[in-house]
Image: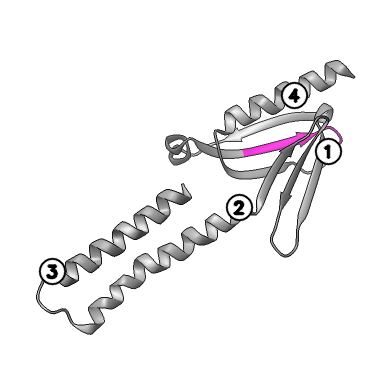
Amino acid sequence: MVKLGYVLCLLLGAGIAAYLLAGPKPENWMWAVLAIPALLLVFAGIRHMQRRLAKLVVLSDRLRYESGLFAKTTRTMELSKIQDIRVDQTFGQRLLKIGDLSLAALGGASPIVILSIDRPQAVADHILELSRTRKAAS
């Protein structure tokens, strides 16, 4: 999704520049239209940073979710205590094969919510399988 954003910004910027250069000499203010793909590029960069700064690590007996740049938040759940995994996908997310994953553990702690991950159902199935394996070993 992030790569698609970068490509679309590049294509939009190149298209606008080609249009302005192909016609008669454009007014100076017309070049300001290039600020649109630049602004979209900033949003894509912010999204890229958010994705790079969130990490889900599955260890042998627990699951750890880390997020943040300057202030880091780490949540850890024991795999044997995972009670519920929910996958939420909007229509657009389904088309792009991404979605939101929500993990809830026994004990009523607030769930871990991971936004816009790739193949969320496969990740949920994998975590559930590890959780079942861990419960059977206990």
Instruction: State the separation of the CA atoms marked 1 and 3.
Output: 63 Å
Horizontal side of residue 51 vs 35, given as left or right? right
> Where is 138 relative to 24, above or below?
above
Horizontal side of residue 137 vs 88, given as left or right? right
- Tell me the quarter of the picture where residue 124 sits: top right
Residue type for callout 1: Gly
Which secondary structure, mark 4?
A: helix
- Mark found first going from the N terminus, 4 or 3: 3
The numbered dot on residue 52 is 2
Foreground: disc 4 or disc 3: 3
Which secondary structure, mark 3?
A: helix
The residue positioned 73% from the left and 49% from the top of the image is 66
The residue positioned 35% from the left and 68% from the top of the image is 36
Q: How is the image coloured?
A: one colour
The part of the chain drawn in magenta is: 101-108
Instruction: State the separation of the CA atoms marked 4 and 2.
Output: 25 Å
Instruction: State the separation of the CA atoms marked 4 and 3.
Output: 59 Å
Instruction: State the separation of the CA atoms marked 2 and 1.
Output: 29 Å
- Tell me the quarter of the picture where residue 100 sits: top right
- Mark found first going from the N terminus, 3 or 2: 3
Say if the magenta span includes residue 104: yes
Which secondary structure, mark 1?
A: loop
Horizontal side of residue 12 vs 38, given as left or right? left
The residue indicated by pointer 1 is: 108
- Tell me the quarter of the picture where residue 134 sits: top right
The residue positioned 63% from the left and 38% from the top of the image is 101
